[in-house]
Image (spheres, rainbow, N blue to C red):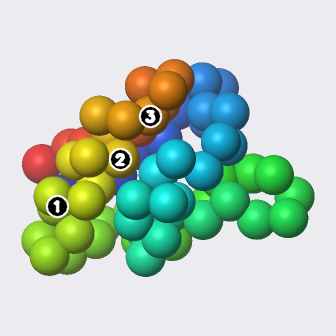
């Protein structure tokens, strides 16, 4: 699976980071960083939850 973020929509509110900090991080500069663009299958459930709970629907999964 591949994590794709639409940074034009993203508000860096850290909902995704709170769900799966191994994949997403909001840093002191208030920008979201994707730490693993292709996380392992062990993170699929958490990443899927992050996609569903993103307030701006800025995260999608490919594959």
Q: Are marks 2 and 3 in contact (CB under 8 Å)?
A: yes
Q: Residue 37 occupies which quadrant of the picture?
A: bottom left
Q: Residue 8 occupies which quadrant of the picture?
A: top right
Residue occupying the point 30% across, 67% down: 38
Instruction: Answer whether residue 2 is visible to the viewer in this image.
Output: no
Looking at the rendered structure, which numbered label has been put on residue 54? 3
> What secondary structure is marked by label 3?
loop
> What secondary structure is marked by label 1?
helix
Which of these two is toward me, 35 or 56? 56
Looking at the rendered structure, which numbered label has been put on residue 44? 1
Residue occupying the point 29% across, 34% down: 52
Using the numbered discs, state the Cα–Cα distance from disc 2 to disc 3 in whole angstroms.
Answer: 6 Å
Q: Pointer 3: residues within 10 angstroms few (<14), some, or many (20+)? A: some
Using the numbered discs, state the Cα–Cα distance from disc 1 to disc 3 in whole angstroms.
Answer: 15 Å
Q: Which residue is mark 2?
A: 50
Looking at the rendered structure, which numbered label has been put on residue 14? none
Would residue 52 be found to the left or right of residue 62 on screen?
right
Q: Position of residue 46 (x, y in %)?
A: 25, 59
Does 62 appear above or below 10?
A: below
Which of these two is toward me, 29 or 20? 20
């Amino acid at each position: 699976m591949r994590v794709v973020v639409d940074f034009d929509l993203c508000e860096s509110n850290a909902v995704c980071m709170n769900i799966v900090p191994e994949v997403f991080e909001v840093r002191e500069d208030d920008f979201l960083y994707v730490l693993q663009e292709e996380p392992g299958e062990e993170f699929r459930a958490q990443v899927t939850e992050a996609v569903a709970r993103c307030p701006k629907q800025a995260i999608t999964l490919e594959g």
